Image (tube, rainbow, N blue to C red):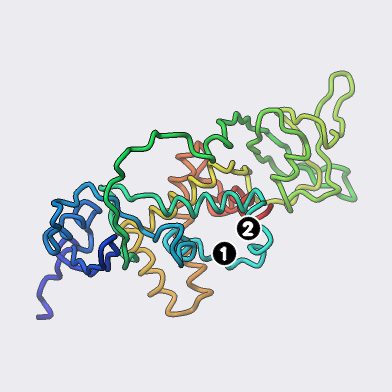
Amino acid sequence: ALLAKADPPSRKERVVRVCAPDKYYVVTCAVSATVADFLRNMDEQHPAAAGSRADWRVFRVPADSEEGHEQAAIDVLGLGFLADMPEAKHNLVPESGCGKQWRRLLASAGEPMSPHARLGLRIRVLWVQPPPEVEPIAQASEAEEEDAPQKFFIVDATCQKSTVKKFFSVSGKVQVRLPVGANVAELRGILGWDFPEKARVLAERPGRGLCTLLETDTVPAHVVLTDFRGRRNFYARFTNAESKRVLTMVIEFFQRPEGEAKLTTVWQAAKGDEGRYGMILCQVLSDDVYPPILRALGLPDDEQPLHLVIGGLERMALD
């Protein structure tokens, strides 16, 4: 028995509870089942008088009107860590920008699953509905309307530090992605704590040499930063649409079998220590999850990807 071969994922089975309009069902399907496979299994195990359910819609969370919808959406999307942050109560109020983005993310969990999507190992309950009688006309989402395509440019910045012996000493260079037409205040906001409040942004002016820029001045392609104390080489802040895309891609990674396996391995390696679990998970995010996401956004994937993504998502944590 010890030498017996383990069943491949396609042969291992799982049980899913199903909430249908008429009653509750229990459906057995393969661990690696897609939505189409699941509906086929449901038809085989619980035939319907009206015929095949192949075109039925499958949902990961109950309808908006049902109790527990919001918590189910948070659990399915893996956003519990954001909801538990100390700043969440203030930053995620419905009227704020972050709150509106948060509501859109939760709403995305209520969309029907693709027939080719895998169920995901964490899913234990599904909701099914027959297809609507009239197919709604596809319209641009609120997020797409709000986040029209934005043009960016890269600022090359030479970093300098003030010293007693020498007024300026060069300490390196960084690049910052900014929206076209951005001013110094926006540059300062993206650099955050790495650029002190009293530090200055300098640029060459015709006939005047190196001059200090005002907060309202447009940032040119080449600047000098004084007293810069960061250790990263690239900075960017994601738009709302980019933030949603990043979080969606993270969720999709961990819903795939290989992503589920990664989480299991991380938990086993942590041996129940939550602090160690977080450290190992951050390494997985940095090595396996974030680089392909950054490439999809057209950003460098080899410039401290973990910190680049965390900094890029700052819009989600701060209002």
* Whether residue 251 is situated above or below residue 156 in the rendered picture: below
Q: Nearer the viewer, residue 302 or 68?
A: 68
Image coords of residue 23 (percent x, y): 25, 66
Image coords of residue 56 (percent x, y): 25, 50
Picture quadrant where residue 296 is located: top left
Mark 2 touching mark 1, by CB under 8 A?
yes
Image coords of residue 285 (percent x, y): 47, 57
Secondary structure, mark 2, is: loop
Could you classify mark 2 by the number of other residues whose Cα lies within 10 Å: few (under 14), some (14-19), or many (20 or more)? many
Secondary structure, mark 1, is: helix
Could you classify mark 1 by the number of other residues whose Cα lies within 10 Å: few (under 14), some (14-19), or many (20 or more)? some
* Residue displayed at 43% across by 45% down: 292
The amino acid type, in three-letter code, at marker 1 is Ala
* Residue displayed at 24% across by 54% down: 34
Q: Nearer the viewer, residue 67 or 88?
A: 67
The amino acid type, in three-letter code, at marker 2 is Leu
Q: Of all residues shown, which one is farthest toward the top?
A: 207
Image coords of residue 117 (percent x, y): 29, 50
Q: Nearer the viewer, residue 76 or 299?
A: 76
* Residue displayed at 49% across by 39% down: 141
Picture quadrant where residue 31 is located: bottom left
* Residue displayed at 46% across by 67% down: 68
Judged left or right of residue 115, residue 291 is right
Q: Earlier in the sequence, mark 2 or mark 1?
A: 1
Residue marked by disc 1: 83
Judged left or right of residue 47, residue 141 is right
Residue marked by disc 2: 92
Q: Nearer the viewer, residue 3 or 141?
A: 141
Picture quadrant where residue 49 is located: bottom left
* Whether residue 141 is situated above or below residue 311 in the rendered picture: above
